[in-house]
Amino acid sequence: MSFGRTRAIAYGAMALFFVLESPVQAQASARSQRERFDTLGSRETLVHVLGRAGISARDAREALSTKLLEPGRIRVGMPVTTRSQLTDSAPTEIMLGLAIDRILHLKRSGAGWTGEVVNLPWTTDTITVSGSVRTHLYAAVNEAARAQLDASVRDRLTDALASLYEFRVDMSRDLRVGDSFTVMAERQHGPQGAVRVGKIVTATMKLSGQTIDAIQFKSSKVSGEWFDGEGRPLRSGFLRAPLELRRITSGFGMRRHPVLGTMRRHEGTDYGASAGAPIRAIGDGVVIKAGWGNGYGNMVDIRHPNGFVSRYAHLQGFARGVTSGARISVGKTIGYVGATGLATAPHLHFEVLVRGAPRDPRIALRNTSSDPIPTAERKAFEVARNEARQLLVSTVRVATADTSAKRSAQ
Ligand SMILES: [Zn+2]
């Protein structure tokens, strides 16, 4: 974040802060009061900043000794506003911007300094984003959400969508041109125009002609928060990729062995990623190897139920506690991407073996066995599903109408 932007946010937050006081009081005191805006520089302390505002070091230390000021919240660019009751007197109020939506208000009275944390409100609405894939999911969402989200947060929606489907779809490899998605998510508006992406409300994806809905439902028999249109949990035993989508830099698609330089049958999947990117276990299991594997470099093998083994190779290093015999739960970081063994560039080589034989993860990890919602809850589930589908259809229509209205107005 640039320094200029930090300042702009700081001023806005302060402006909002003043709105919280009664307008009458603010007007009456504005004539005699003096306010000073400042920010914490990179080579100074808050005591220095307050010194510039005319607060003695001793006074500043006392004011800042409050437990409400966590040291972790003090950062370069932190907005600092001071207020004096008279234009020629020392400040009796200090406002520190703890976060974009939180201010620590310190006040001096006869008894010394007192503090209070003021939360600035966020409001929430929902957006529906619908698009189709031409290259990859980030590009597709980026294009589709242009009207609803700033560029800086569009990728967060992609991340949320990818993790919603992470037990069903490897978004880096399973998408085809023409695959489409519709997602409804919360959008939160904070002080000074800040926008962030909240929770996903519902979604649907069409992948190679197959539709996978994401419906929220609470079942008393089947665990999980999300279900597909057939009432099966979206979550299954295995994550479909050993790296989060945001860590994967490319499809890689390497078939020519980079070191041996020959075309050879490739028994795994290669994920392009930066060195040091965390690798996650695709399922619950037990580590059966964590060590050197010649061409594989540093490698980890995890045994899962039903004769499945997942293999992760060329690691830069292992996560703490990942040793032979260790129990690992799904999603846990087991190591970090590297280029050890026969690898010229950092990437993760990933394999799935079933009863000792390498298998295509796309087929081996396909979700087949999770129990669907039982008959007793079927009606309630169908109501929830139909409502969710209707919600997506109607909001997409509104959004489309909106866009065309804007176009015709231009
Ligand atoms: Zn490989």
Image (cartoon, rainbow, N blue to C red):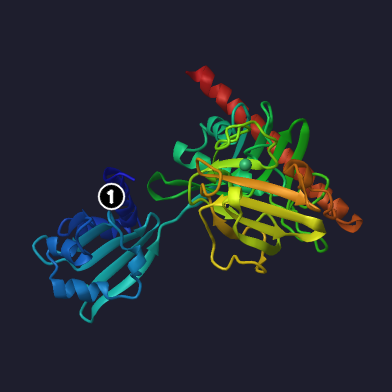
Whether residue 98 is visible to the viewer of this picture, yes or no, is: yes
Q: Residue at x 80, y 44 (%)?
A: 229
Lateral position of residue 147 relative to residue 368, left or right? left
Amino acid identity at mark 1:
Tyr
The residue at label 1 has a CB less than 8 Å from ligand 1: no
Q: Position of residue 356 (x, y in %)?
A: 78, 52
The x and y percentages for residue 146 are 51, 32
Residue beneath label 1, please?
Answer: 11
Classed neighbour count for the residue bearing mark 1: other residues with Cα under 10 Å, few (<14), some (14–19), many (≥20): some
Q: Quadrant of residue 202?
A: top right
Residue 337 horizontal side relative to residue 176, left or right: left
Based on the displayed image, in which of its 4 quarters is residue 75 positioned? bottom left
Q: How many marks?
A: 1
- Which residue occupies the foreground of this view, 93 or 159? 159
**329 to 247, vertically: above or below:** below
Residue at left 73%, top 34%? Answer: 206
Report if residue 243 is visible in the image.
no
- Percent across and percent down for residue 167 are 70, 49
Residue closest to the eye, 331 or 314: 314
Q: Is residue 264 left or right of residue 135?
A: right
Classify 256 as above or below 20.
above
Identify which residue is drawn at 36% across, 65% down: 72
Question: Residue extending furthest bottom?
Answer: 111
* Above/below status of 329 relative to 311: below
Q: In terms of image quarters, where does ligand 1 lie?
A: top right
- Disc 1 secondary structure class: helix
Q: Residue at x 54, y 30 (%)?
A: 143
The residue sitting at the right extreme is: 375
Q: Quadrant of the N terminus?
A: top left
Measured from the top left, where is residue 55 in percent x and y?
14, 68
